[in-house]
Amino acid sequence: MPPIIEVKNLVKRYRKSKINAVDDISFSVGEGEFFALLGPNGAGKTTTISILNTTLIKTSGQARLCGFDIEKQAGEVRQRIGVIFQNPSLDRNLTAEENVRFHASLYGLYPFRPIFSLMSNSYKEKVFELAELMGIRQEIFQPIITFSGGMKRKLEIIRGLMHNPRVLFLDEPTTGLDPASRRNVWEYLQNVRRKESTTIFLTTHYLEEAESADHIAIINKGKLISYGTPEEIKKDLKIQTPTLEEAYLEIIKNHDN
């Protein structure tokens, strides 16, 4: 079975920059896999995710998702992905539910209706299910302007999970969440992965979230410097029973030197 994500010699250089933000990286991700892309701030993680979810144009190289070229067949790619962005992307002039509804309609998940009561029962049930999961069931019809930073993060997670995507991109998804909400999110994600064979593509600074990944890629200064299972990444270190965090920090330090 071909991989669900294929990246070959991917390069991204921003205008006026003298170096590549993403520098000739290659990797693949299998269907239903939990894949983690790790690296320091500015390493190229968000740039890579943005290219794969069609919101950023690559400079060169090849990338395919679900067999579709990410640029030539961007519409097909968007129908098969869910994205929880690192930076907020909510409309402050709308209610929480309106943000979800416009997003769902934009991505063709549900036909748009001007008010919530006219939306399909499946849409309503999904909104309430996810709002209950994230602990904002009572606030789902309130204006975004009244939401705290943590509540906005929860709403973005709801929006990204509204359909059952083949690939779910999570760019530091639990930043700003309390421990209980983080646990609820990961329990839900692992359940979705088991039931739907959803592929999860994660970037995070909470390295314990990547401990259960099938494969991990570590990127630094735009280059892919380590790849393998968590155990493969840890095995070459002289530390006895190292944690993933210790292995990660050692790999980054060695590459910087």
Image (spheres, rainbow, N blue to C red):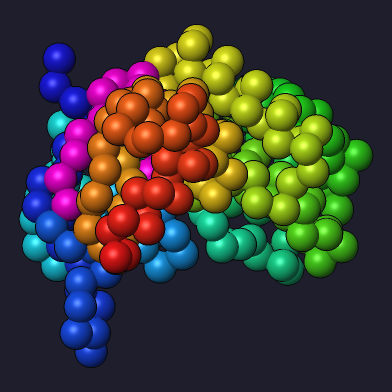
Q: Is residue 20 above or below residue 66?
A: below
Which one is in front, 218 or 158? 218
Residue placed farthest to the top in the image? Answer: 195
Counting from the top left corner in percent of width and height, residue 2 is at 14, 22
Residue 167 seen anywhere in this rendered image of the structure? no
Q: Is residue 226 above or below residue 34?
A: below
All told, the count of numbered labels is 0
Quarter residue 121 falls in: top right
Tell me where the magenta segment starts and ends, as one range. Answer: 25-38
Which residue is at 45% across, 50% downward?
249
Q: Quadrant of the N terminus?
A: top left
Q: Is residue 24 above or below residue 65?
A: below
User: Is residue 188 highlighted in magenta?
Assistant: no
Counting from the top left corner in percent of width and height, residue 232 is at 31, 26
Residue placed farthest to the bottom in the image? Answer: 16
Q: Is residue 10 left or right of residue 37?
A: left
Q: Is residue 194 left or right of residue 219?
A: right
Quarter residue 120 falls in: top right
Residue 254 seen anywhere in this rendered image of the structure? yes
Counting from the top left corner in percent of width and height, residue 175 is at 65, 51
